[in-house]
Image: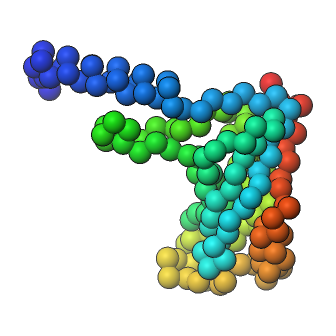
Amino acid sequence: MNISKETRERLQKRLREVTQWLNEHVLRYRPREEITLFDFNINPAQLDGSFKVKFDGEVCPMLFRFSYGNTGNVDVYFPLFVSPLGVPASYGAVSIPKHCEDAIIEAMRKNFPSIKPYGRNQQTGEVIGNHTSLKDRFYKDTDMQTLLERFSNPAFEIRIPLSHNP
C-alpha cells in the first residue's frame, strides 16, 4: 500500500502524541507484597460486575470488571482507554507485571465456581447457548446464594500474597 510522505509524517506525529499521552496517563504498579481485590459490585442476574484493586495497599482508582464467559469460567477485564485522542484503538489503562495479572485471574477463578460452558455436553446431549438462563448453567452443587452474599458483603476482600512471585 502506497502512503504519501505527508500522510506517513502525519501518522507518525499522531503515534508520538498517543505514545506521550499513554506515558502520562497509564497507571503503573509493581507490587511486591500483596494484591487485594475488594469492593465487589455484582449484578446477580448476569453474575458480572466490577471490583477495585489495591497493589501493596495503594488503591487503583480504576475499576476492573468480570463476567462469566463461554468457557464457564469467570473472565477478568482490566481497565482500558478507548480511543484516546480520537485514535481508533484501545490501550491498557493499568500496567502490572504478567505474574500479577495471572494472580488476579487465578484468584477470581478460585472464588467464582465454574458453570456449564457453551456447547453440547457429550454425555448428556444438553445444549448450553446464548438463550440458556444463567441458573441453568449452574452445576447442582453450586450454592449461588452464598456466593452472592459473600461478594455483596462490603468487608469481603480477596488477598493475594506475592512473596512467591518474581
Q: On the image, which quarter does residue 150 sit in?
A: bottom right
Camera-nearest residue between 116 and 93? 93
Q: On the image, which quarter does residue 32 sit in?
A: top right
Left or right: 44 as drawn, with respect to 34: left
Give the residue displayed 50% in from the left and 44% down from the top: 80
Q: Position of residue 123 (x, y in %)?
A: 68, 78
Above/below status of 148 relative to 56? below
Q: On the image, which quarter does residue 17 sit in?
A: top left
* Number of numbered discs: 0
Camera-nearest residue between 9 and 126? 9
Q: Can the viewer see residue 9?
A: yes
Give the residue displayed 46% in from the left and 38% down from the top: 91
Left or right: 37 as drawn, with respect to 86: right
Left or right: 78 as drawn, with respect to 34: left
Left or right: 39 as drawn, with respect to 160: left
Q: Position of residue 108 (x, y in %)?
A: 75, 55
Q: Can the viewer see residue 102?
A: no
Q: Position of residue 50 (x, y in %)?
A: 64, 59
Q: Position of residue 27 (x, y in %)?
A: 59, 33
Camera-nearest residue between 8 and 70? 8
